Image (tube, rainbow, N blue to C red):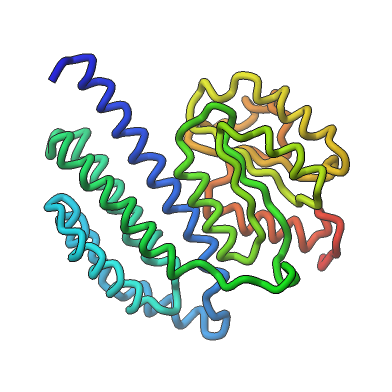
Amino acid sequence: MDKGLYQGCSSWLVQGLEALGRDIGARVGRLNTAAPLQGTALHSVRAGQAHVPVDDLHMALLKGEYANALHICRAFRSAQRHDRSAVYGRLLLPVIAQLGRDWSDDRAGFEQIAFAYSLMHRLIETLGTADTPKARIGGALYLGHVVVVVAPGDTHEFGARVLVKHLELRGWDVTFVDGFSTGRVTPLLQAGPVDALAISVSTDSAFMGLADLIGEWRCVEPAQHTEVIVGGAAIMAPYDHYRFLQADKVGLHIDEMSEHLLSQMTHGRYGRWSLS
């Protein structure tokens, strides 16, 4: 393979695996809310004792055995029925990490890893159909409305889509906007109410003009009280470096988002009630 082409393929594959990992992680918190609250501690202990078939799933994907991989995921999810997020956080995420190491350590070729990567996408889509919450009449049972938007021009949206699933399963009404449709954000804010605007930034180039755009969105009526949260693979500690973005919160991980939003809501940040 031509060196330039190889480097391009390598970059695409690494970025794809990273985005896939973020996407999976976003589902974890969303699913936890749907789990029964009663007996949570006991269920957590039992879940911790259960065998997690990371190696089995890893090998099935490398061998291209999609049916076997799906069976492994479904069997594990069935065994973890009290923790619907376990299949994502405890099984799929570690496998994504292993595939990344396979590629970086030359344990598998490009074609093999790329095929495993595509199979992982299929797994998530198939598993996700069972995780979609039932429609809530009139949105009355939603905790609030969050707009998840990919930074303009950023094509790595898998992590943002995982965040959408994560928050939906946690009880939030979520609208997704990709990096080529950010013109939709202003009308969404105008239609309101939008409790939080979560912006995903996966590449350094996506920071260009983002601060100005956030400033414009903050001026939209009635969005002045909308919380602006920026996260993604391009955000690195220390987070003080991102003050120029004028965001309310920077650097939250996917599994921290729902807890942060719920905490803000219960303390009256979104103007509905306060439980403090």
Asked if 167 appears above or below 247 in the picture, the reply is below
* Among the 4 quarters of the image, the one containing residue 101: top left
Question: Residue 125's x, y, as percent?
Answer: 38, 57
Judge left or right: residue 120 versus residue 66.
right
Residue at 42% of width from left, 53% of height from top? Answer: 24
Residue at 71% of width from left, 65% of height from top? Answer: 143
Question: Residue 118's x, y, as percent?
Answer: 28, 46
Residue at 71% of width from left, 56% of height from top? Answer: 145
Judge left or right: residue 10 versus residue 18.
left
Considering depth in this image, is 17 or 50 the residue closer to the camera?
17
Asked if 156 appears above or below 6 in the picture, the reply is below
Question: Residue 63's x, y, as percent?
Answer: 12, 52
Residue at 49% of width from left, 53% of height from top? Answer: 26
Question: Residue 116's x, y, as percent?
Answer: 22, 47
Asked if 33 appears above or below 272 in the picture, the reply is below
Judge left or right: residue 11 versus residue 86.
left
* Among the 4 quarters of the image, the one containing residue 46: bottom left
- Of the 4 image quadrants, the one containing the N terminus is top left
Judge left or right: residue 252 versus residue 202.
right
Q: How many marks?
A: 0
* Among the 4 quarters of the image, the one containing residue 229: top right
- Of the 4 image quadrants, the one containing the C terminus is bottom right
